[in-house]
Amino acid sequence: MTHEEIIEMAKQAGFERLGHTDNDWVCVPENIEALVELIAVAERKEWEKEFAGMGEWACVHLLEERNK
C-alpha cells in the first residue's frame, strides 16, 4: 500500500487536512475506526490476489512464515 493510497483512505474516512503538508490532519475517533476498516479491506484484497489459486495448506504455510 502506497503513501498516496493511505492519504486517500484517510480522506475517505473523514480526516481533514489542517495545513499544507501530509502531517497536518485532524480527526475524531470515528475517523480512525473508519480508516482502520478501509485499510483492513485493502489488505484483504492484497492477500486475496497473493493467495489466489493456492491450496489451503500452502496459504497457511506462507502465513506462518510471514509471521515469524
Image (cartoon, rainbow, N blue to C red):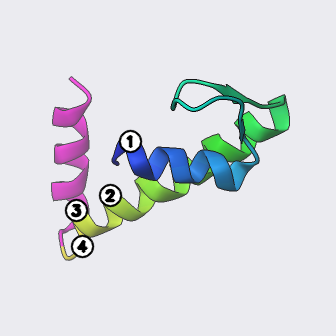
What's the mark number on residue 50?
A: 3
Image location of residue 8, percent across then percent down: 54, 53
User: Tags 4 and 2 in contact by the CB under 8 Å rule?
Assistant: no
Secondary structure category for the residue under label 4: loop
Q: Which residue is mark 2?
A: 47
The residue closer to the viewer here, 67 or 7, is 7
> Height in image: 56 above or below 11?
below
Residue drawn at x 54%, y 24% is 23
What's the mark number on residue 52?
A: 4
The residue closer to the viewer here, 51 or 34, is 34
Secondary structure category for the residue under label 1: helix
Q: Image check: 14 left or right of 12?
A: right
Mark 4 or 1 closer to N-term? 1
Q: Which residues are magenta?
A: 54-68
Disc 4 versus disc 2: distance between alpha carbons?
8 Å
Mark 4 or 2 closer to N-term? 2
Q: Amino acid type of disc 1?
A: His
Disc 4 versus disc 3: distance between alpha carbons?
6 Å
The residue closer to the viewer here, 44 or 18, is 18
Label 2, residues with CA under 10 Å away: few <14, some 14-19, many ≥20: few
Q: Quadrant of residue 20?
A: top right
Residue drawn at x 72%, y 46% is 34
Q: Image check: 61 left or right of 8?
A: left
In front: label 4 or label 1: 1
Q: Amino acid type of disc 3?
A: Glu
Q: Looking at the figure, which quarter contains the C terminus? A: top left
Disc 2 versus disc 1: distance between alpha carbons?
18 Å
In front: label 2 or label 1: 1
Q: Which residue is mark 1?
A: 3
